[in-house]
Image: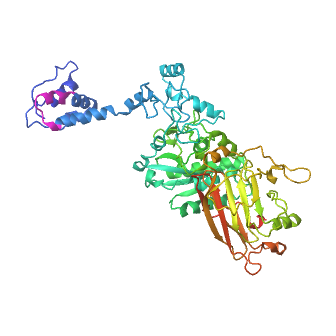
Amino acid sequence: APPSACGGRTAMALRTAPQARPLSLAPAPQHAAVGRPRRQQTDARVVTRVRRVAPRACNSSGTPQDEAKLGTQATKSSKSSTPAKQARRQSGRRAPTPRDGVERRSAQCYGCGVRVQLKASDAAGYIDPERYAKKLAHHQLSELLCARCEALAHGAMVNAVEGQGMTGRDARGLVSQDELLASLKSLKDQAVLVLLLVDLTDLSGTFLGRLRESIGGNPVLAVGTKADLLPRDADRGAVRAWLADELGRRGLQIMGAMVAAPRCKDERKAAVGAIAGAVLRERKGRDVYVVGASNVGKSTFCRALLGALRNRGDFIAQAGRLPVASAMPGTTLGAIRLQAFGPKSALYDTPGVVLSHRLNSLLDGADIDAITPRKPMRALLASAPRLLAAAAGVKRPPYVVDLPAGLQADTMSGLSAVWGGLVRVDVLAAPPGLTLGFVGPAQLRLAIHTGLVGDDNDIATAPEGGGWIPSAQNANTSSSGEPHREDAVEPPGSALVAATGGLRMARSLEFDVPTSGRAHVADLAVSGLSAWVCVTAGEYADERWAIGSAGAGEGAVQKIRLRVWAPKGVLVFSRPSMPIMDPEDAL
């Protein structure tokens, strides 16, 4: 550049003499070069200073507009530098006040990811002001754990999501669903590896059908959680293949499906280690995001995955101040960055997607805690009264539901099963060999009733005088073998059922009877409930079970017709049966 150009003269002066003369404010000629002088290319710091100062002087003297734009761009790039971002993260400045009216800071709670606040003690993210001031003075804002997370870590069920349960409608300081989804909206514009978590005890209710709208074409590795809660006889390999088929049937293209949290501690360690190996193979330098519906176990999985990475030699994987895990839906409220895979990559725990059609999105914390399984689930079997009587003389599975006294029917047609006060299944038509296996936690009591199938109304209430009969699984029987009636015990969710006007007919289903052999027909899954109904029918291989023959006799029923009731707004799904037991073992 010619010596008369203000930019070139300033750059040479700054490079050669610390005591250089002041910048010249003389107007630059119109033919002066706007680009960077050749001698400036060796010192980027000097160029940055020139671009921030020189355009101001030239603007007041008629410098071309292109040079002013160049200075503006340099100023913006310097402000977005990494050290500036890190400094702002450690600052105690206030963040924009969200629509919930709670003034929040920029620092995040490491347990749930929400921005902390110092005023509303009953809202998420609350930190004692004195504690916050101490952490701020010592530059330890990354070590803040809010009061709600401390309560969740000790077993409390504290809601913080708008629309969750009967009490989460108008409370102050609740996080909206749009805020929860904000961390997922930008994934489609990034190159990341997505770990999709689905709950094996509630696959239909936790599947995200519109996942690709948020993640774009990024690769997906599916992981089935809570396998330790499946019945003990379930084959993990068969369940993994069933999971891959189900996700493919729903239209989601995945790289593979894996199952986490087996029953045995050694198997659990090996399973999570295999998932860690798959993540390391497929990551290819990308960040890893763990996504899924609320309450599928994302935070628990992240904690286990970090431990598996450390066992595989990734000593940079974060070991302390990990996300809080609890049974309360909506525990995580913001994206949490966890150190792993090296200094330039990370593992992210994301908020759960709230699905309004799930039952646990309508229940309060106490009811959710009451129906959450704590140990492997068992299948309560219900079938025709005469088939049950025959089973008593040949073989009797350990968990068979008690039927009302005096029933001698050959089929279940006309019977209704009330399950935990939250689900009711009416049998409209059934062959003699029909068996309903109610797979769920022991807290969900099952009672069989008569006289309800003829009710064609779309609203149902609890059977009058029927009580809630405990099943044989609870071993609550009198000396005469008759089950005790515990009318005083209300099932979990009874308040929800009463508030919504009772159970409503959610779906009517019809299935074909297997023509040869005995087989599982389908599973009936209630969204948001860690339980399902396994429908089994067909002929038995053992001739002693002739009563179970589907085609015995002229005019035998060749269709299975069921009607399922659930609380208002809860969806009921039909799916291929999960391979958890042999069809011959289902009575």
Give yes or no for residue 385 being in the magenta stretch.
no
Residue 10 locus on image (x, y percent): 17, 27
Could you tell whether 16 is left or right of 459 in the image?
A: left
- Counting labels gives 0
Could you tell whether 426 is left or right of 348 in the image?
A: right
The answer to whether residue 582 of the structure is visible from this angle is no
Among the 4 quarters of the image, the one containing residue 258:
bottom right
Residue drawn at (43%, 46%), measured in percent from left and top?
A: 185
Q: Magenta segment, which residues?
A: 53-66
- Of residue 250 and residue 264, the one placed in the foreground of this image is 250
Q: Is residue 216 above or below residue 312?
A: below
Q: Residue furthest right?
A: 479
Q: State the colouring used for the structure image.
A: rainbow
- Of residue 301 and residue 211, the one placed in the foreground of this image is 211
- Of residue 489 and residue 51, the one placed in the foreground of this image is 489
Among the 4 quarters of the image, the one containing residue 558:
bottom right
Residue 282 locus on image (x, y percent): 51, 52
Q: Residue furthest bottom?
A: 554
Image quadrant holding the N terminus, namely: top left
The answer to whether residue 292 of the structure is visible from this angle is yes
